[in-house]
Image (tube, rainbow, N blue to C red):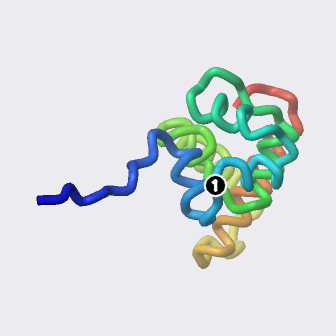
């Protein structure tokens, strides 16, 4: 009886994002301007991701949870929504489509990265 080959499960959220985009690590590396071993280091946690690379990944559609992990991703979403609500926009639209919410979070992450602080 032959063993059925199973696709290897992603080991973290970045690896899951790369798969969701139907890319291999080498292709993803080219898109963000790094060598393939660097992507391996990002996935394994051996190397941190620069702000420049984070911005490229965000433009590609990575979610805060995929980029920063579940807990940090949720906190970032909360920060972005809190910032939006506290910016004097009472009475403005509070029901968003998924696309609008994703764009709001993307712009919010850029603002957080622009502040130079660690996210």
Viewer-closest of 54 and 6: 6
Please give left or right for residue 90 compared with residue 18 in the image. right
- Name the residue nearer the viewer: 48 or 113: 48
- Residue 70 in picture, x, y percent from top left: 48, 42
Locate the C terminus by quadrant: top right
Give the camera-side residue of 49 and 39.
39
Secondary element type, mark 1: loop
Measuring 65% from the left and 55% from the top, which residue is drawn there? 62
Q: Residue at x 87, y 45 (%)?
A: 33
Q: Vertical placement of 62 versus 38: above or below?
A: below
Q: Which residue, as the protein is rendered here, is positioned at the far bottom?
A: 97
Q: Does residue 65 show up?
A: no
Residue at 55%, 36% (x, y): give it: 72
Q: Is residue 66 above or below residue 59?
A: above
The x, y position of residue 51, in whole percent, is 83, 36
Q: Is residue 29 left or right of residue 82?
A: right
Which quadrant of the rendered structure holds the N terminus? bottom left
Residue 91 percent across, percent down from the top left:
69, 72
- Residue 33 in view of the camera: yes
Residue farthest to the top? 46
Report which quarter residue 6 is drawn in.
Answer: bottom left
Residue occupying image coordinates x 60% and y 38%:
68
Residue that extends furthest to the left in the rendered view of this protein: 1
Write down the residue under mark 1.
Answer: 24
In the picture, residue 46 is in which quadrant? top right
Q: Is residue 51 left or right of residue 97?
A: right
Locate residue 45 relative to residue 6 in the image: left or right: right
Instruction: Looking at this view, name the residue that lies furthest to the front.
Output: 1
Q: Position of residue 38 (x, y in %)?
A: 74, 32
The crowd level at tag 1 (other Cα within 10 Å; few <14, some 14-19, many 20+) is: few
């Amino acid at each position: 009886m032959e063993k059925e080959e199973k696709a290897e499960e992603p080991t973290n959220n970045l690896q899951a994002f790369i798969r969701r985009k139907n890319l291999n690590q080498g292709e993803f590396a080219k898109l963000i301007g790094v060598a393939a071993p660097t992507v391996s280091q990002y996935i394994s946690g051996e190397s941190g991701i620069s702000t420049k690379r984070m911005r490229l990944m965000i433009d590609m559609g990575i979610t805060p949870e995929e980029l920063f992990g579940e807990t940090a991703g949720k906190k970032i979403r909360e920060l972005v929504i809190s910032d939006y609500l506290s910016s004097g926009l009472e009475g403005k639209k509070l029901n968003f489509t998924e696309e609008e919410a994703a764009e709001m979070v993307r712009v919010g992450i850029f603002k957080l990265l622009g502040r130079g602080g660690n996210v």
